[in-house]
Every structure is written in structure tokens, then in C-alpha cells.
Amino acid sequence: MFMTYFSPTDWESWGLSSQPTIPERMPVLIDEDLRFEDAAGPRATTVLNRWLQELPALGCPAPGSWETYARVARDWTVFLAERGIRLFDARAELKRGLSAYAVHRAIGPVEARFAASTWNQHMSILSTLYGWALDEQYASAVPFTYKQAVTMYGDRVRMRQVNLAKRRMPKAHVTIKYFEEDFEGLFLQGLAGLCPDGSEDPCYRGRTTARNAAVGGFALSNGMRRQEFTHLLPCEVPALPRRRSPLPIRVPVPAGITKGRKFRTTWTTYDALARLHQYMRMQRALAAMGSSWQPPTRWGDPLVVTEADELGGRVNGERVAWAELTPRERRLLVAPGGGSMLLALQADGSPFLDWNTVFKRTSQRIRERFEPRFPHTAPHRCRHTFAIRTLERLVGGYYAQAAKLVKDTDADAALALYLSKTDPVMVLRDLLGHSSVLTTEVYLRRLDTTRIYRDAYERAGDDHALLAEAEREADDEFDGDDDI
């Protein structure tokens, strides 16, 4: 079985009466003999392709996720077929196949083994597939066994199903990592090609330090995902305030590039935004000036922009709102003066997309030259770091104190009121774009939030001489223990 991708190009020549409803770039699974049915009726690939085509309506709108789902279903189907088991066989056969698959992926050939997180992802996807197949009456049984579990977060209690096929993993709080404050500064210096003391690193040979430091620092300050800050346009970057403010600066995140296409507003600091504006005025402007860059043919036809402003522009002559453009469409945008419209550019004006490599090489150089303990770094570590720093400031009262410095007539009065009156977890929910505060609570359980609240408590106690009194009161509770 192999996988290809659907394209509606030239569909008029296919002899169809109407345009296909299959989304562009939708994965299509095909058996090696290029047949979708035989004497027994439609094959499993036909059912899988229908499931894939319905994913956008089942809460999975991202093309990248479609490909992941297709690969998982393909690998599982091929594994079963090699052992004489059909995709929608009887429960006993499916359970036997699942057991063999678990062994194969755990202690089978090295190239076939899965980490626990990958295995659990595959089980979640296959569980979704079989749930859909049951509803559509393609399957009469599933290979999984479930149990009911009770989860409690604060005063919320709910029941949920647990798939017993999933592997046990380390506690979540040890799997999500963020930068400690000293490592955060070290990383920013590394992106800029500097030594820890801020001096030039004579061993660094990179030429794009201004871009890397500006965009990397911006990502650290606002918690955007890699897809989001990679596909942001310069005209969507908020203007730099005329004067420095202790309050954060709002940053709208367009729905077209967010996870689940949900618009949200996050924020950034004045210093991070100032560095980004300096990069846009100087290094980025030089890279884009007179650039003849055009998107590669494999990406698609170029989208030439004219009359661009902060909300949208004319794209191939038609007025388009930036917020509606997907990452793929944004990569095709050609700026009015030449070069890509994306925020980060290479020297020839082409878009820069490979932030994984930049972060990996920066962390590797720091480990080799300055700090052996420095962690391996991926872009999502910036998001975790933003979350933990923001929560520290919210719980510690930093933003509340900053809000008191803003006069009622100031343009930041509404933000000041929001920060001083809203629960920290609710603020963080809005900034991270979570669908509910429960999601944020679960997320925070995977970070070192105990330390944050402990530090805030100790600071407050020291500031108001409450801690010593509390210690004395606690000691009094144990004074009579010797009499027992």
C-alpha cells in the first residue's frame, strides 16, 4: 500500500459533472495493484480514504495531521494484512493483531520501534478510526479494551475512558521542559552569536545573528508556536509604542496560522518588540530589496501582493485579509518590492522556515563551548518558557504592580484592569489559546508550578514580615507534643 496526495488541478478534463469535494493535499491510500475493490466488495483502502476525507469535519482541519493519520492507518493495515488479519475483522482476531503489533513496536527490529509517546499517539488515532468505523457500520468490533477512570482538577470531577493499549509514561511534569532564567539569557546570546558575557564569539561563523536573535527572542516573549511565528507577516507585527511601558504589548495571532484556526491575542515585551522592529528596518529590508525570489514550482503558483497594509492586501489583484491565509498560502506570497512576505528572510529574500535547525545548532554550540548542561532545544521550548515566566509574573504580582503605574486615561487602562482583576490561570489560558481553563490547568500540572507559588508565598512573607510569624505559630502547635 502506498500513499499519494489529491490535487484538483485540471479536474475539468476528468469527465466529471462537478468539481470533486476531496480537499486539496488530502492523502489517498492505494493498494499496489491500483484497485479499490474486488469480488468481496470495497477494500479497506476505500473505507480508509473515506475516513480521511471526513477528518476536516471530525475536528481535524490541519493537512499535516491528515498525513499523520494516513500513515498510522496505512502501517497498521499493512501489518495486519501480512498476518492474515483484515482491518475490520472479528474482535478476537483484532486483539491478536494488536498484541503482535505492540511487541513489534516495542522490542521488534530497531527501525520499527516506537517511543512510548509515539505508540500512544498511534493508539489514539486508531481508536478514532475504529470509533468512526463502528458508527458508520464498517466495523463490528474494535481491538482495544477500555476502562473508566476518574479525573479531578480542583473541584471538577469527570469520568473518562482509558485505552489499556497505551503504554505508561513518565510523570508529565518531567517531560515538558522550559529554560531557567540563566539558560534563557544564554540561549538569546547564543542566537545572537555572542558569548555569555555579551562579547563577540570568535568561533561563530553565522551571518544571520540579527534575524535569529530578533525572531527567537520574539518567540520567547509571546509563546507562539513554531508554525505561528514562522508564518507571521511583518505587517502583522504590532507597532512599537512611542514610549516604554512596564505592561506587555498585545500581539494578535491570525486564525489562519494557529492550531485549530482559533484567533487569539498574546503579548510581548517592549524590548523583544524593539529588537524585532530593528531587524525589520535593517537586515530584513536589505534582504528583500530588489529580490527576484519566486516560490518553487512544487509549492504552487506565486501570489503577488500589492497595496499591502496591516489587515490585508491585493493578492493577484483580489483583496485578501491576511488573517484568512493558511501557512501554505503565506509561503507563496511575493512582496510588492520583491522577496517573500514572511517575517524571517534569507539573504536572497527567500523565506526562512527551518527554525528547528537554528535552535538545535545554537544549543549544541552552547553545550560545546560554554555550558555542558545546556539542554537540547526545539522551538516549542520557547512556548513552555513563556508560560512559566508569565505565570511567575502573574502570581508574583509583577503585572499587578505595573498596572498601578498606568493612569486611568492611559491607552493601556483596559489591559491594566484585566491584569489586576483576572485570575492568573484565566490570563494564561487566553494567551496560550487553550479551549478551556481545564486544558490550562492540565498543562500547568506538567510545569514546575509548585515552585512558583512557593516562591511567591515566601516573597510575600518576607516583604510583610508574615513568614516569621507563621513559623512561630506553627511551632506553637507542636509545643505540647512532649506531653503525649
Image: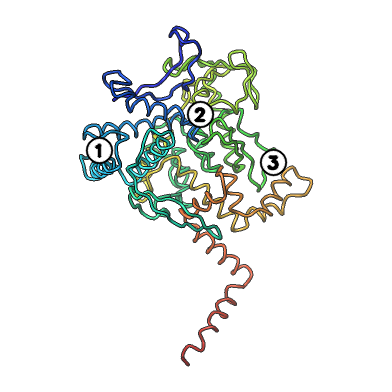
Q: Which residue is mark 3?
A: 243
The amino acid at mark 1 is Ala
Q: Is residue 366 left or right of residue 280?
A: left
Residue 118: image x %, image y %? Answer: 34, 42
Q: Decide which of tag 2 and tag 3 comes sooner along the chain.
A: 3
Q: Tell me where residue 149 sits by quadrant.
A: bottom left
**Which residue occupies the foreground of this view, 72 or 137?**
137
Residue 475: image x %, image y %? Answer: 53, 82
Q: As displayed, is residue 461 above or below residue 371?
A: below
Kindly identify which numbered label has been placed on residue 112. Answer: 1
CA gap, disc 3 and disc 1: 57 Å
Q: Secondary structure at mark 1?
A: helix
Q: Which mark's residue is nearer the viewer, 2 or 1?
A: 1
Residue at image position (66%, 47%) is: 247
**Which residue occupies the foreground of this view, 256 or 345?**
256
The amino acid at mark 2 is Ala
The amino acid at mark 3 is Arg
Kindly identify which numbered label has been placed on residue 205. Answer: none
Q: Tell me where residue 396 sits by quadrant.
A: bottom right
Asked whether disc 2 touches disc 3, contact meaning CB atoms under 8 Å apart, the reply is: no
Q: Decide which of tag 3 and tag 1 comes sooner along the chain.
A: 1
Q: Secondary structure at mark 2?
A: loop
Residue 309: image x %, image y %? Answer: 65, 24
In the orientation shown, which residue stands out farthest toward the bottom?
483
Q: Which residue is mark 2?
A: 344
* Quadrant location of the N terminus in the rendered image: top left
Q: As displayed, is residue 212 above or below residue 375?
A: above
In the orientation shown, which residue stands out farthest toward the right?
409
Other-residue count near label 2 (Cα within 10 Å), few / some / many at <14 / 14–19 / ≥20: many
Residue 221: image x %, image y %? Answer: 55, 43
Other-residue count near label 3 (Cα within 10 Å), few / some / many at <14 / 14–19 / ≥20: few
Q: Which mark's residue is nearer the viewer, 2 or 3?
A: 2
